[in-house]
Image (cartoon, helix red, strand yellow):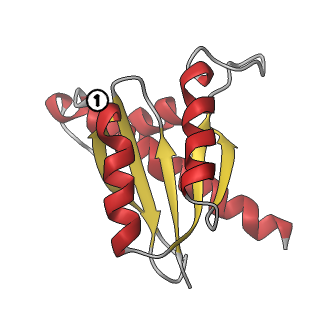
Amino acid sequence: MARILSIDYGQKRTGLAVTDALQLIANGLDVVETKNLEAYLADYLKREEVETIVVGYPRQTNGEDSENMKRITPFVNRLKKLYPNIAIEMYDERFTSVLAHQTMLDSGIGKKARQNKGLVDRISATIILQDYMESLRFKI
């Protein structure tokens, strides 16, 4: 079975998470500068079999698209052209940053580590992936 990769796309940094080969567990993978994201993905996808890429769909609390969609839409379109054999899906990412901060508080991570925005991005990508995987279970 191939992996599922999730992307929490940001203007400066992007958090990544990935499942194990059996698609049972979501783990934080990395945080990369967004300007280097496509090169990072090209390298990763050469080494690992990925069947689906889940990109966080940023919406505001009222359901409207957030400002970041103007950057995400062209990125998703490029992914679809570059990797036609990989399913590219958008998944609602509302509140993932809030959940990431709460996860860090609950796990006892110190104040200095909680200020690491890259850690928040990686945890957010993991939450997006976990939620996506859970939604698949309910579709069955």
Q: Residue at x 50, y 37 (%)?
A: 99
Disc tally is 1
Question: Horizontally, is 63 left or right of 32 in the view?
Answer: right
> Tag 1: Cα neighbours inside 10 Å, few (<14), some, or many (≥20)?
some
Q: Position of residue 94 (x, y in %)?
A: 63, 31
Reading the image, the residue beneath label 1 is 117
Instruction: Judge by depth and name the residue closer to the eye, 116 or 17.
Output: 17
- Compared to residue 133, the image places residue 7 above or below, namely above
Q: Position of residue 78 (x, y in %)?
A: 56, 42
Instruction: Judge by depth and name the residue closer to the eye, 1 or 120.
Output: 1
Q: Residue at x 45, y 41 (%)?
A: 124
Q: Amino acid at mark 1?
A: Lys
Instruction: Judge by depth and name the residue closer to the eye, 11 or 98.
Output: 11
Query: What is the quadrant of the C terminus in the image?
Result: bottom right
Question: Horizontally, is 105 left or right of 60 in the view?
Answer: left
Q: Residue at x 61, y 50 (%)?
A: 81
